[in-house]
Image: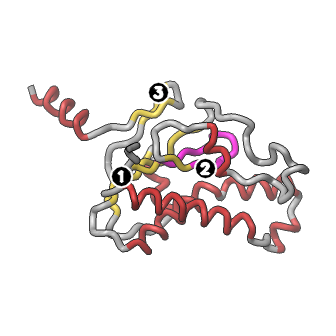
Amino acid sequence: MKSVSKSLYLFRHIQTNQVLFSMKQVLKPTQLFQLPFAKKEQSTAPYGMRPPRIRKDHWVPILKADFENDQVVTSIMSQLLNYRRYRSIQPLDKELLAMPVSQRNRLLMQQQVPNTIADLADILRKKELTNGSVNIQWKDQTDSEYADWPESVKMDPRRITTTRGFRPSYPSSSTIESMESTVSV
């Protein structure tokens, strides 16, 4: 039986701010299907807002969330996708429709990361998990300020670091312990 991860990873595209969800540390090409097309008809926008392929140097991690079991992770990931689908079919405000298309698209893209983080916080609040059962590591700690987090979430002070700007390195408790023992000697 294939083991399912107890972690959820959120990645951000560095140019467009699009967000992908993954249960693994690396993105697979099939995960691009999480992103909607620009138009409702697939034939009018074959590539639309979806990049044609995953370039590892264009996707950086936003956060890594560790949960108690894998069922919670799959449930939260499907709910995040449902929130995204719901948001993509909502009609635009009159102020947005009055803007030029390029400016409107830029504004909508800038809102994707904050909206996804707020959606995650809302889902975790509705799940009513036990206190401290969710551990979140951030690449940029200021991203956590986009939402009010429930008590079940514990913010990990360790940052997700990247080498060469895009290769994520997720610190584990064993690496921290080995670093502390080296320092104390």
Label 2: state its secondary structure: strand
CB atoms of marks 2 and 1 within 8 Å: no
Say what secondary structure mark 1 lies in: strand
Query: Do residues under tags 3 and 2 come within 8 Å of each other at their CB atoms?
Result: no
Residue 137, visible in the rendered structure: no
Residue occupying the point 64% across, 51% down: 34
Q: Residue at x 49, y 70 (%)?
A: 122
Rate crowding at label 2 as few (under 14), some (14 to 19) or many (20 or more) other CA atoms within 10 Å: many
Quadrant where the N terminus sits is top left
Question: Callout 2, which amino acid?
Answer: Val
In this view of the protein, can residue 54 be seen by the observer? yes
Q: Which residue is mark 1?
A: 66
Magenta stretch holds residue 44: no
Residue at 48% over, 65% down: 147
- Residue 78 x, y percent position in the rendering: 54, 61
User: Pointer 3: what residue?
Assistant: 163
Q: Nearer the viewer, mark 3 or mark 1?
A: 1
Look at discs 3 and 2 and give the one toward the viewer: 2
In the rendered view of the protein, which quadrant contains the C terminus? top left
Q: Position of residue 182 (x, y in %)?
A: 15, 26
Classify residue 106 as left or right of residue 55: right
Among the two numbered marks 3 and 2 on one chain, the one whose residue lies closer to the N terminus: 2
**The residue tagged with tag 3: helix, strand or loop?**
strand
Report whether 151 appears left or right of 56: left
Is 167 drawn above or below residue 125 in the view shown?
A: above
The answer to which image quadrant residue 130 occupies is: bottom left
Boundaries of the magenta span: 9-20
Residue 155 vs residue 17: left or right?
left
